[in-house]
Amino acid sequence: MELKSVIFDMDGTLLDTLDIISRTNNRILQKHGFSAHTIEEYKGFVGDGMRMLMRRALPEGTSEDVISALLPEVLDLYHEEGVGTIPPFEGIRETLSGLVERGIKISILTNKEHKYALLNAETILGEFHFDAILGERPGKPLKPSPDGIFEIAEITKVPLSQTVYVGDMKADILTAKNAGITSVGCLWGFGRKEDLIALGADILISEPKELLELADKNQLK
């Protein structure tokens, strides 16, 4: 298959956001008398949007009203803490440059709130033109729904057969499978290799640059 479009997850795939996620959530949790969590625990909380992360971080049975009250505080603090300090993973910039040089379209599909997805991309990876950036939006289903994949395919005008989705979590692999496209599991993120294997990821890569090698060899399904 000739690769023409790569869609990336954001947190845990392009950006190493775990530190800022854990710091901001813990500060708000402790402010309201709840227990903080370790970074390892947050690895199990991420992947399905910030509301679900907050729900997992709070005691079981916490009301949705409490979640709704705390969530804006977390998001405001996340912004104040300095979005520009979030590092991309090693090799991401070189890989994005390499894809663009090869004429391959690059896009982002994330369960992060849409405005923060745009802000993160503009602030941290602003030198790149992404053909589409889609985050959590009212009325739009989150991953693992394939709707975002289909929407990006319409924007890029690239057939699904020439599109792959790259991510580190269960929701990412399932999203690709639900859309009927090749799933690429990245092993540098927050997910576990054994989980990605169990979910049937089509390809596993240990470094971002492996995407370029696979594209050059046309080894994607």
Image: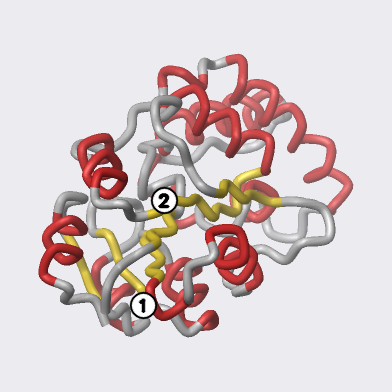
**What label sits on residue 213 in the rendered view?**
none
Label 2: how many residues lie within 10 Å, few (<14), some (14-19) or many (20+)? Answer: many
- Taking the image as shown, residue 72 lies to the left or right of residue 87, namely right
User: Which residue is more in the foreground, 171 or 140?
Assistant: 140
- Taking the image as shown, residue 99 lies to the left or right of residue 145, namely left
Give the percent coordinates (x, y) of residue 217.
11, 70
Amino acid type, residue under disc 1 in the picture: Thr
Q: Which residue is mark 1?
A: 182
Q: Which residue is mark 2?
A: 106
Question: Residue at coordinates 36% horizontally, 37% vertically from top-left?
Answer: 16
Amino acid type, residue under disc 2 in the picture: Ile
Please identify, in this view, whether the residue under mark 1 or under mark 2 is nearer the observer: 2
Give the percent coordinates (x, y) of residue 163.
40, 70
Of helix, strand and loop, which one carries label 2?
strand
Q: Taking 37 as reference, is 24 above or below it?
A: above
Question: Residue at coordinates 48% horizontally, 42% vertically from top-left?
Answer: 130
Give the percent coordinates (x, y) of residue 75.
67, 30
Q: Taking 12 as reference, is 174 above or below it?
A: below
Give the percent coordinates (x, y) of residue 136.
69, 51
